[in-house]
Amino acid sequence: MPLGKRTDCGDAKYSGVQVAFASDITASLQEHLDAGFDFVTAPLINPEAVCKSIPADSIQLPYAHDDILLVAPRYSNQVVGIASAWREPDASDAGEKRLSGAQALRLELEWASHMSLQACILPMPQGRSCAHLACVLNQVINGLSNTSMWLKVPLRPAASTGTTVSAGDPWRAWNSVRSLCNHSSKLGALLEVQAEVPPLQEVLRWHGEPVKALLLPTNAFLTNKRGYPTLSRAHQELLTRFFQMGVQVVLSGESRHSAPSAAPATPAENGFPTPSGSGSASTVAAGNGVAAEVHPLQPYHEYLSYLFRRPPLPAGQEEMEIGYRDYLQVPLQPLQDNLELQTYETFERDTPKYTAYEEAIHDALLDRVPQSEAATRTTVLMVVGAGRGPLVKAALSAARRTERRLKVYAIEKNPNAVVTLHRLIAAERWEDQVTIVAVDMRSWRAPEQADILVSELLGSFGDNELSPECLDGAQRFLAPGGISIPCAYTSHLHPIASAKLWGEVQGYNDLEHYETPYVVKMHRFTPLSPPQPVFSFHHPTKDPHPDNARSTSLTFPRDGLPAALCHGLAGYFDTQLYGNVILSIHPQTHTEDMHSWFPIYFPLKEPLLCPAGAAIEAHIWRCSANHKVWYEWALTEPSVSAIHNPNGRSYFVGL
């Protein structure tokens, strides 16, 4: 399977190769495409032509490629430009009219845009040159159509101290240019892999950055027993991580392994297995039937293809979630709004959740009704927010398993869901066990009290769909000693780096979206510290007038961790349904295969630099008024942000 045949790796559909200057780009490109590569990275100008030899009043550069050699789609899909090295004017230029590095770079980027190249690779400067480079980029960035810029950044261990740009920490130089360019979505990083892989924490730091490709030199490869190229386990893990995050790979350097002149060996013969259904794509035959000479880099490409297809393809729930990766959604408000058919269907397919609810009801029935009373005592169970009936099904299934008598009230305010609920009850012939109540639970007067109260009003942050307010109000239905399912839930929070998520919010270009929390299947992000508990709620409560407003301050230690940019806070929750039955979306305790809830993301208006080892202090408030509930959040360490969403001005949950 070639690299482009996976569907779960986002933009990682191409493997590239860095080529030298060639006057005939058509022949050079075709040579590498025939070897299996999907694109080339090539110099924009002839490297033998020194910029300082060009008169300053000239508008011409010695471009490597004529725009009539290839049609535009081939340039845009199969060629990435490489900008020439540039320099700032110095004393040796005095009295001479020479084209400066900044002028040359500006012309090169404009030419790359004219050629519709998908990207242009830029060298990473150091020190004050970062500002000069950023100045040039800002001058041309808005004029670029579809061309993005990849800054080449060495992937090596970061400096452990300091807050200024340091040659020991290339990330700082990258962050300087990125910040000076106002976090432009057209600016990405090309990570230059070294012969030695840095520590895991350094690799993880880049998960939250806009890494577009890895530049992999041939001198990073080892030689296996059969004489073919292979990578160390550390390099394999590095590439696999980034492949799964939608990052491309670009091979650079001369071949250090001899390729056979006849038909190449299969991957298995090269020393790595061939997955089922995939054969060797490397057999090349000349027109006269004689095997053609193999491209010297083809064994490297075969090995990269093997690494790319080695992880199993996603299946089931994981495959369904691919389309939601890093896609921002405003949280549902089921109390204020009526949910749609598609939303109900998505939730109802979440088998692990309803299996857990059934187990919780099962255990509650056994505890509530002893075996001696099973034939004579009827348990009253109320489902508040019954939707189209999945919890009703779970309750009746639990009753059959426990051989307990059960009477169910299904309370639902959405008239459209009630239609389906009536049809379900009729189809299953549950009329003698289930009573449908088409009303808002807050205004209903129950004819009798419930032994068990069941709901699924939890949101991605536990309480963000107003479960506390709803269940406190519905508590009047419960008999003394009655059981609430869920009986407790806790939210969790931690700071994250995610240029992808923050960039999506930035694209709206207004205050409201920076002050709105989002439900999102986070994919390209870096946790900056482990999650910590935030707010907890218990039901039923003994407080006759509960106050569900909350506030807390959290300090997240980062001892030994490199500098990073914090783009916001990620939230999760876990819940105790009953007894030992738990549901969780906390990363460390996530319920297997459950998909009803994605994490919640609280963005920051301005990303905050977190120096190496510096702790992060976050504050979050859960506020309430007569008709709404909202969150406010801020950071106060290592620097101070504004308080987001004061008084719920941009986002609130309606009561």
Image (tube, rainbow, N blue to C red):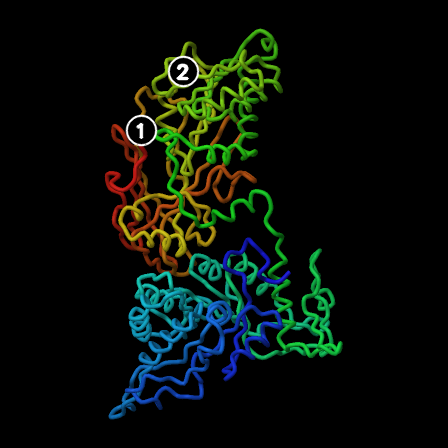
Using the image as rendered, state which of residue 571 and residue 387 is in the foreground: 387
For residue 343, the mark is: none
The residue at the far right in this view is 289
Note whether 255 is above or below 494 in the view shown.
below
Residue shown at 37% from the left, 69% from the top: 173
**Camera-nearest residue between 654 and 586:** 654
Residue identified by numbered label 2: 477
Dot 2: element: helix
Frontmost of labels 1 and 2 is 1
Q: Residue 309: which quarter of the image?
A: bottom right
In x, y percent, where is residue 552?
32, 39
Residue 509 in picture, x, y percent from top left: 29, 53
Dots 1, 2 in contact, CB < 8 A = no
**Residue located farthest toward the top when viewing the structure as drawn:** 376
Q: Which residue is mark 1?
A: 655
Specify the quadrant of the image occupied by residue 336.
top left
Characterize the local packing of mark 2: few (<14), some (14-19) or many (20 or more) Cα atoms within 10 angstroms: many
Q: Which residue corresponds to the image point at 69% horizontal and 79% vertical from the top-left?
A: 293
Quadrant where the N terminus sits is bottom right
Residue drawn at x 29%, y 84% as measured from the top left: 89
Is residue 542 in view from this perspective? no
> Is 516 placed left or right of 381 in the picture?
left
For the C terminus, which image quadrant? top left
Q: Amino acid at mark 2?
A: Phe
* Residue 19 as seen in the image, left or right of residue 107: right
Q: Position of residue 258 (x, y in %)?
A: 68, 78
